[in-house]
Image: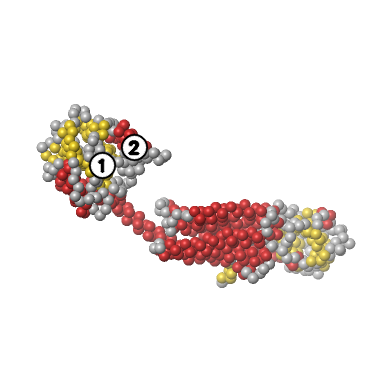
């Protein structure tokens, strides 16, 4: 008794289709590969009409009779790679054997050369698709045919081209996504302070990689496990990154509710392994995945609309683009769930869409539209930020020029005294200042101040104060009168903020008269001087200040400093404080400033010492 016979003895050229007349039987016995095995009781089937595969052992046998004298016949099998083992006249085919579940691929082309000295062939196919292969609802075989080497190679190329042609548009779109991700990273490198670019870069790269791996798996370039274990779990990570990008783009902090949602998205990453092992059904999983990412697809555009209505115009730019990727991915999952459950009413959501000569998946079309839309959005965003950076650079340059007027490069010389100064700004431009003005007859006026705030605005206020001080100092006024008049001018001209200032008039004989407007009291030989501190300048118009007088003897040191010393803070949040400041107040200006900076600088630090020599 022999296998079902297909008589192709009249075949002359080309190829013969072998999909009909196969005998099928469940189970596994290597003896069924032998030509003499009696398979007459087996069921007869057509290989291209078997439907979706099942994860179990099953054998198929066919006896083929070819014409005598034909040379170099080849067998073409288009079936799941690693899903079947082929035997010809009882001999195993080396390149067609069963593979582990993580190496199995969708149906691909395999050519098997036949012996020239034989005319009768018994072909046996031992099949065992893994659970994951069956979950994809893939068939075991698409076709089997026999013919000349050239004819079979042409058929192989034809089937291979169909596989790749269907995947090329999708793979190309996802390559564009990844290139756009690299472009977003380049934007981040040029504008390092804007985290939204790095999140957009991660989003586009991960989305392109995830979808690219999916289509490479579905086209047979990679094993199916690559999608199940790598590409599919990335969908959750991509959704998390999209949330982070959306909040960063709108300049918002991620709320606790959204943070909890992000954590929940990362929780089911291991579920794909359970699907691959058959512990969870595909229909249940794709439904679960669609439900998990749908909140992001629906609520992120709503959030952007709310922020737009509250005045964030750029949030409005992102509303339409944000609708595409996550929403289309969720709809694609719904279509797959309809397909796998057999419901059928929403199968169209998982079907390709013809666009001219090519077909695209719904998610491909959404991703392509997203890239186009986000490119426009980020162009306008980048242009705006670039303008702001140019303006800020110009302001910084102007502030640096002003800073040179606030803090002399070298303190001036005063007969009978040694002066040291140290200035460490917290930013590129600070609000501290100090100056020494000659008042004639061997008298000098020394001023140390601190403008509230930082940057250009603080520097301009400091310049205004110094300009007024320079005019007042030439009038021979005492420190209290100088502060009173300066306060009146600042209160009337400054828009907001205030200035703390200590003003001291020093004579050649060592007499020092001090008035204080809300500033730190100076130290004499490491001991704080008791000086009444009035209101800072610029708060109220009518303020009077009092004076204190002291005398500096030989080698006495008078130390002035700003609150950047006292308010230095270490990593544990501990302030440098008055006690430590008092302990180092007898050191040189450079040592005091350096000690405070090493402790943990948070504000501008200015130290000025005046020693009697």
Residue ranking furthest to the bottom: 356
Badge 2 element: helix
Residue 237, quarter of the rendered image: bottom right
Circle 1 is placed at which residue position?
A: 519
Residue ranking furthest to the top: 554
| Residue 116 as seen in the image, left or right of residue 163 | right
**Residue drawn 79% across the image and 64% down it:** 70
**Where 334 falls versus 521 (above or below)?**
below
Count residues near mark 1 (Cα–Cα under 10 Å), then give few for <14, some for 14-19, many for 20+.
Answer: many
| Residue 499 as seen in the image, left or right of residue 148 | left
Q: Nearer the viewer, residue 410 or 356?
A: 410
Circle 2 is placed at which residue position?
A: 577
Q: Nearer the viewer, residue 120 or 83?
A: 83
- Residue 78, percent from left and from top: 71, 62
Q: Nearer the viewer, residue 208 or 326?
A: 326
User: How does the figure colour the protein chain or chains?
Assistant: secondary structure
**Residue drawn 76% across the image and 57% down it:** 56
Picture disc at residue 423:
none
Count residues near mark 2 (Cα–Cα under 10 Å), then give few for <14, some for 14-19, many for 20+.
Answer: some
Badge 1 element: loop
Classify the position of the N terminus by image quarter: bottom right
Q: Earlier in the sequence, mark 1 or mark 2?
A: 1
**Residue drawn 18% across the image and 45% down it:** 544
Is residue 520 something that shows in the picture? Answer: yes
Is residue 223 something that shows in the picture? Answer: no
**Residue drawn 54% across the image and 55% down it:** 261
- Residue 556, percent from left and from top: 21, 29
């Amino acid at each position: 008794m022999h296998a079902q016979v297909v008589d192709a003895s009249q075949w002359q050229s080309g190829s013969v289709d072998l999909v009909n007349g196969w005998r099928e039987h469940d189970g596994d016995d290597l003896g069924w590969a032998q030509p003499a095995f009696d398979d007459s009781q087996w069921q007869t089937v057509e290989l291209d009409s078997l439907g979706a595969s099942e994860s179990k052992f099953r054998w198929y046998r066919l006896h083929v009779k070819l014409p005598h004298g034909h040379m170099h016949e080849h067998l073409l099998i288009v079936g799941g790679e690693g899903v079947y083992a082929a035997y010809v006249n009882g001999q195993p085919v080396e390149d067609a054997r069963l593979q582990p579940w993580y190496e199995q691929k969708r149906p691909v082309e395999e050519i098997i050369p036949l012996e020239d000295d034989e005319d009768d062939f018994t072909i046996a196919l031992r099949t065992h698709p893994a659970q994951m292969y069956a979950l994809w609802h893939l068939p075991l075989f698409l076709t089997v045919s026999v013919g000349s080497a050239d004819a079979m190679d042409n058929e192989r190329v034809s089937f291979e081209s169909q596989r790749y042609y269907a995947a090329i548009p999708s793979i190309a779109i996802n390559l564009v996504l990844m290139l756009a991700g690299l472009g977003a990273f380049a934007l981040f490198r040029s504008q390092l302070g804007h985290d939204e670019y790095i999140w957009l870069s991660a989003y586009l790269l991960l989305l392109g990689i995830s979808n690219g791996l999916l289509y490479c798996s579905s086209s047979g370039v990679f094993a199916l496990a690559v999608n199940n274990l790598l590409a599919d779990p990335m969908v959750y990570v991509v959704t998390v990154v999209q949330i982070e990008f959306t909040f960063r783009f709108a300049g918002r902090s991620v709320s606790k509710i959204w943070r909890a949602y992000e954590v929940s998205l990362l929780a089911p990453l291991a579920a794909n392994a359970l699907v691959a092992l058959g512990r969870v059904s595909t229909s249940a999983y794709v439904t679960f995945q669609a439900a998990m990412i749908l909140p992001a697809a629906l609520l992120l555009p709503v959030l952007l609309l709310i922020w737009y209505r509250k005045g964030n115009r750029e949030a409005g730019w992102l509303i339409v683009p944000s609708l595409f990727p996550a929403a289309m991915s969720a709809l694609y999952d719904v279509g797959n769930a309809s397909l796998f459950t057999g419901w059928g009413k929403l199968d169209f959501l998982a079907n390709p869409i013809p666009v001219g000569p090519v077909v695209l998946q719904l998610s491909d079309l959404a991703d392509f539209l997203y890239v186009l839309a986000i490119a426009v959005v980020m162009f306008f965003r980048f242009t705006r930020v670039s303008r702001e950076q140019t303006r800020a650079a110009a302001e910084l340059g102007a502030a640096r020029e002003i800073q040179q007027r606030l803090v002399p490069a070298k303190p001036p010389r005063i007969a009978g005294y040694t002066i040291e100064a140290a200035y460490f700004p917290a930013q590129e431009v600070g609000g501290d200042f100090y100056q020494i003005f000659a008042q004639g007859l061997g008298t000098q006026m020394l001023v140390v101040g601190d403008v509230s705030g930082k940057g250009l605005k603080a520097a301009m206020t400091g310049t205004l104060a110094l300009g007024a001080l320079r005019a007042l100092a030439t009038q021979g006024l005492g420190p209290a009168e100088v502060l009173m008049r300066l306060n009146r001018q600042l209160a009337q001209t400054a828009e907001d903020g205030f200035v703390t200032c200590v003003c001291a008039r020093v004579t050649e004989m060592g007499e020092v008269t001090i008035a204080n407007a809300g500033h730190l009291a100076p130290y004499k030989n490491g001991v704080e001087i008791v000086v009444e501190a009035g209101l800072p300048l610029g708060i109220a118009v009518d303020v009077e200040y009092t004076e204190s007088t002291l005398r500096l003897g030989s080698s006495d040191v008078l130390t002035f400093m700003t609150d950047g010393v006292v308010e230095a803070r270490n990593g544990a949040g501990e302030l440098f404080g008055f006690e430590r400041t008092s302990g180092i107040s007898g050191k040189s200006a450079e040592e005091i400033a350096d000690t405070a900076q090493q402790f943990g600088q948070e504000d501008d630090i200015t130290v000025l010492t005046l020693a009697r020599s």
